[in-house]
Image: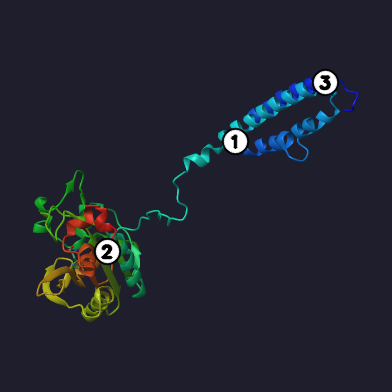
Amino acid sequence: MGPLESASDSMAELDALEAEGVKAFHSAANADELETARIAFLGQKQGRVKSAQERIKTIPSDAKKAYGQRFNAVRGALENAWEDGKKRFDKPAAIIQGLDVTLPGRAPRLGHLHPLTQTATELIDLFGRFGFSVARGPEVEDVFHNFDALNIPDSHPARDPLDNFYLPGGFMLRSQTSTVQIRVMEKQPPPVRVIAIGRVYRPDTVDATHSFMFHQIEGLMVDRKVTMADLKTVLRLFAQSYLGEDVKIRFRPSFFPFTEPSVEVDMQWHGGDRWVEMGGAGMVDPNVFRAVGYDPDKYSGFAFGLGIERLCMRRHGIDDIRLLYKNDTRFLEQF
Ligand code: PHE
């Protein structure tokens, strides 16, 4: 542009500047593009508005006034267009108004394992240290594994339909994890040292220490010369490790068709004089060995079956078994 340029050309330039500038500000898709347009048009050093302003020196004096007025209008229009663009991209900041980034964060709530699952995991760990590995069996069991193979005669009251959940076709919901003893011995020769953990079902009336479904841990050890002393030692060591050195347990003579002799094992309940049954145990009956093809003259063994809920309750001071099944997070969060 030189001094020779005509006044009408200069006015046309101002029109073009206005049109291009407004378009650039309106079409900016984000704050960065808007800033690029601002520098190109309104920039203090080399912006096109600045050059148009400087050009006024070259305008013939009779056209200067008109040029100046038109220039002011164009500059105003571009500044407005830029302000409009700024408002568009300022919006997010308006939305997070009131956000105080200096406040401490809110930690996400993490879930954790149910106390019974935690107990089962600890028991597996503890008995693992005594050399017991984990075995499994089905919850829907056949009557043979739940009763016959365990030396429980047809006439035995434990088979009473009122005490069991029978299913069609010779099946039932297992009433004890002793079924897994049989399943393990059917499959492997001695020596055996296993535990089995799982649900068992009995139509008991529900109260603070009973439920129609609960969990048992079954233990079975078979080898040459396993004795009752081994059984008592393992159970005592277990109780002391899981419930604490000072826990008191006692063995009462009892009867189970699949062990001889048999005992019931009690633990002292939450301090006090009350004893609560922890489970049953005994020396594997020779008839059970015969049913699975083990030689009772060569091998002996012990078995035990303990209630996991009661162990968990005794350990944590829980006084009602029903709390373990309610899934009330106010309870569960304490473990
Ligand atoms: N199965 C027995 C019960 O549920 C407990 C038990 C297991 C007793 C192993 C002796 C040996 O009552």
Residue 212 against residue 250 in the figure, above or below: above
User: How many angstroms separate mark 3 from mark 2 (CA)?
Assistant: 114 Å
Q: Nearer the viewer, mark 1 or mark 3?
A: 3
Callout 1 secondary element: helix
How many numbered discs?
Answer: 3
Residue 96 against residue 204 in the figure, above or below: above
Q: For this view, does 223 lie left or right of residue 313?
A: right
Callout 3 secondary element: helix
Q: Nearer the viewer, mark 3 or mark 2?
A: 3
What kind of residue is marked 1? Lys
Question: Label 3, on which residue?
Answer: 62
User: How many angstroms separate mark 1 from mark 3 (CA)?
Assistant: 38 Å
Marks 1 and 3, the one that precedes in the sequence = 3
Is residue 192 shown to the viewer in this render?
no
Is residue 97 shown to the viewer in this render?
yes
What kind of residue is marked 3? Asp
Question: Where on the image, by quarter, is ligand 1?
Answer: bottom left
